[in-house]
Amino acid sequence: MHKFWCFIVLLILISCENDVRVNMDNDGLPVVYCVLDVDDTLQQVRLAKSFFPEKGYTDQDHLTVAQWDEPVEIYIEEWTDSENPNIYNFIKADTIRQDTGYFANPSFQLFQTAFIPKPNIKYYLYLWFPQRNLYAYASTVVVEHPEIITPAAIPGRKITFSDMDDFIVELRLPLNSGFHQFSFILNIEEHKGTELNRDFFNFGAQSYDGNNGQLLLYLLNSSRFYGDLLSRYDTLTGSDYRRIEGVEFVTYSYGEEMRLYNQLFNNGAQPWEIQTYSSFKNGFGLFSSKTHSRLTNLELSELTYRLLTSDPRYAHMKFIR
């Protein structure tokens, strides 16, 4: 009931004033990251505290964060119904799980709840700070699964990386998305004497594209494929060898908020923009979603294997069939 009345008051305040001021007092600013995962049952919120620097603002390449030391209540509203949203409350987690890899700072406290986000549904994330009498909040519409068109799981079709042609990736972009990562993953066994080591070689790219429902065509350069292999794997001698045990293709699609986050945080040319983007009101951070599609049991073509095993430029890596 307390949350309900606070939410009503919040709506009244928003309707009266379009500009919401961020709490920039000496107590610091809540920094929140949450990327809803359509393919997982456990959803996570990361919370920390930060201060905007008084000096050297344009030299900062990230926010310096510290542990959050105040009471907080965190919950998500799922608006599948226009009148009665589902509410999921977060509790503080005892263990840290890996997420997208963006938010690995140990100063972030982890909160979690269990539910599976629904594509094309709007979610609101609220953080209530009773000592400050403050709500931080954000919203997002969850992405759909991307559709992999090429490489397609067609019997007899194989993956070719040649010196003459690039590989064309074709994806149908899901609704509500804006940022995409895709790659071939080669499961490689390395035999050195009596030792067996396993490694995963990723070859792919990323795209900032918001043409939801449209086709995305991307050329994966074959020369870069072999160049990346050369930079990754050293020379083997004697009876040592490497074998490709499996090939798969995976693509991740993220919400529009993640597109803005990556474009601003990784621009490298205008560092003052790094601290300007946030999808939260009365806080700083990111609330978005992600999903993925995967194809397994793909095969490299005879031409690709012939280049890897027989071409003098690559033969020293000792790949065999």
Image: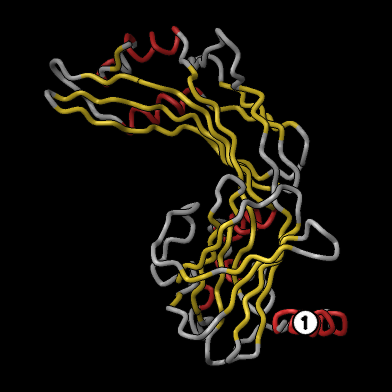
Give the mark count.
1
**Residue type marked 1:** Leu
Q: Residue furthest front?
A: 1
Occupied quadrant, residue 196: top left
Out of 133 and 278, give the one closest to the viewer. 133
Q: Is residue 190 above or below residue 2?
A: above
Question: Relative to 93, is 219 on the left or the right?
Answer: right
Residue 255: % across, % down: 67, 51
Q: Residue at x 68, y 73 (%)?
A: 137
Quarter of the image where the C terminus is located: top left
Residue 33: % across, % down: 56, 65
Quarter of the image where the N terminus is located: bottom right
Q: Residue at x 42, y 56 (%)?
A: 97
Occupied quadrant, residue 189: top left
Q: Residue at x 45, y 8 (%)?
A: 303
Q: Is residue 297 above or below residue 75?
A: above
Element at badge 1?
Answer: helix
Residue 259: % across, % down: 65, 53
Question: Relative to 316, is 4 on the left or the right?
Answer: right
Out of 96 and 315, give the one closest to the viewer. 96
Residue 45: % across, % down: 54, 65
Q: Dot 1 surroundings within 10 Å: few (below 14), some, or many (20 or more)? A: few
Which residue matches tag 1? 10
